[in-house]
Image: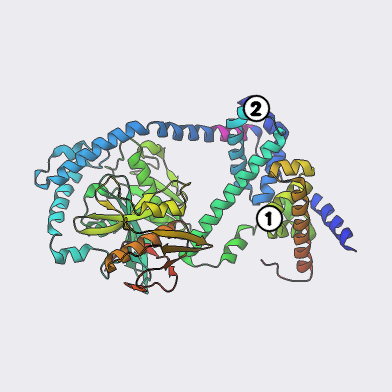
Amino acid sequence: MNKDEKKQNLKNRLKHLPEVTDHRSKKEVYQKFLLQMEKNEKNKRNKRLLPVTALITAAIILILIVPDLFNSFQTSEDNTSEWTANQEDRSSVETDASRDVNRIETKEEHMAVDPAKENDSYVLHELPSNHRVLYASIADEQIQHTIPFAFVVSTNRELETAYNHLDQYIDRLKINQNQYLFHGITYQIDEDAKRVTLQLPDHFALGEGSAVPRMFERMVGNMFRPYGIDMAYFSKGNKDQVDLGALGNVNSLSIEDTVKYSYKLYERNNQRHLIEISNNESESIDAAIQKLQTRGKNKYIKQTIPKELQYQVSTANDLLQFTLTNNVELTNRNGILLIESILMTAKSYEYNRVKFNNFSSEQIGEYDLTKPVPVPKAVNPVEVN
Amino acid sequence: MKIVFDQLYDNYHHDLYQFIFYMVKDKSTTEDLVQEVYIKVLKSHKSFKGESSIKTWLFSIARHVTIDYFRKQTRRKKRILSFFDWSVKEELVEDHAFLPEELAIQNEEIQAIYQCLDHCTFDQKSVIILRYIQSFSIKETAEILNFTESKVKTTQHRGLKELRKQLEFRSKGGIVDE
């Protein structure tokens, strides 16, 4: 058989590939279509409510900030915060948290809670053997951005058991309890089936408005996506349907694709962490890195690239190149912050390595800048004994 | 809306389902993507300018929906792989391990063609499905893919060549690989 005959023969065989049919009825297809349309419309309506939500959020922020500034004047104002779960419980935890904030002013205590112990690092490159990472997030005090944490736990402990101790691990961070939305939740994790069930406590409520529910959804994703889990199920008491505010009455949430982030510095009460600033899908890696050079309106969120520093960004496959174009001296501390915020931002954009060029020093902290630096395993690590 | 849906369903549902199925090779995913196509089409049918036929317009939307699906899949796989350090091949093999009943009852030769289609690029696969499984003309295929007619011919030629190469390799007992 010559080439042309072979080609013709293949074309004929392709035409004989079987017809694959949809066994659903027309009515069934239409019903499913209508349901999806309705769901999309609902999401759209929620977006329209955004300005109202913003106003409510602003009010909540005011309520939150005022007691924070005047710790000793802790009042019942917190109880008016709609989304706060179990108001009475929270109020007492709030008081404890305020005391804790005062306590961590001493150096010893600060060292116990600061995840960046050596060389002021904010990331985890190597996991100690027989350890794994437990992912969790808290919100900033304005409930706008997420601060992720990587608790390094022993593999002797089942993942499910470790997650059921999450409240205790979070307590070590000495944060304001309003920033942690998962208080009292228990977890059932089936690692083989890639599914997690969150049993919500009776007092659990995300309130009206969509900001807090959306953040909750994002945090659930951040916690379980790294394990390949793509669906989270919920229950409360005996009910399998739970009220997640603007997300509706749901029994499950699909864990969406990773949002892309710029990682800036969050500095408050002597604690320094990298914070995730979410970017639009259309924002490129260049735009994401540019954001690292700007200060936000939130006084606790700071730039990680000095304003006066000039640079160029280029990419090739999984490598991002960050090249300085002017001569700026960086302290070790600022250098590490710059490198690690860029590494995490690059990771979020699915780059695996970053090459830092034209730095005045070839070594900053642990980083050998003569070679591409691999992106870290996790951010804001906290060792749990 | 029901009238437009009825028209689309009656005239194109079968072809649309078949096209998406051969692209993604999974019935449940096909159902989801077909639904997504209907939503996009019904939302924008008023703005349809009639510069091409409804059929080619519908299929070009189906192609974009399929591209989006593959992009999301790639991102998801990358994420999982980077965390668990599994090999890429294991993931890919697992995806298409099952044959639908329509294919399972076919002879080995047809099954081999079905499997070897995955070795073509996305564009080559689109052209081959549209031209030989859906029997679209070169002009219609070009409109759907937003290609020139000569690009359709070149892509078709390269796709068939790749398919032939894979089939010959397979018939000699080779393990079909990337």
Q: Quadrant of the N terminus of chain B?
A: top right
The residues bearing labels 1 and 2 have C-alpha atoms spaced at a distance of 33 Å
| Same-chain check, marks 1 and 2 | yes
Q: Quadrant of residue A111?
A: bottom left
**Secondary structure category for the residue under label 1:** loop
Q: Which residue extends farthest left?
A: A72
**Residue A79: x percent and y percent?**
19, 38
Question: Looking at the picture, does residue A82 appear above or below residue B87?
Answer: above
Output the chain of dot 2. Answer: B
Instruction: Report the magenta stretch's main SS.
Output: helix
Residue A30 forms part of the magenta stretch? yes
**Residue B124: x percent and y percent?**
71, 54
Q: Is residue B95 among the parts visible in the rendering?
A: yes
In the visual, does A86 lie left or right of A2?
A: left
Residue B4: mark in rendering: 2
**Residue A122: x percent and y percent?**
31, 63
Question: Looking at the picture, does residue A26 appear above or below residue A303?
Answer: above
**Boundaries of the magenta span:** A27-34
Q: Quadrant of residue A47?
A: top left
Q: Which residue is mark 1?
A: B99
Return the disc, 1 or 2, that comes first in the chain's sequence: 2
Number of other residues with Cα within 10 Å of mark 2, as a class: few under 14, some 14 to 19, many 20 or more: few
Q: Quadrant of residue A91?
A: top left
Output the chain of dot 1. Answer: B
Q: Give amino acid for label 2.
A: Val
Question: Looking at the picture, does residue A360 appear above or below residue A138?
Answer: below
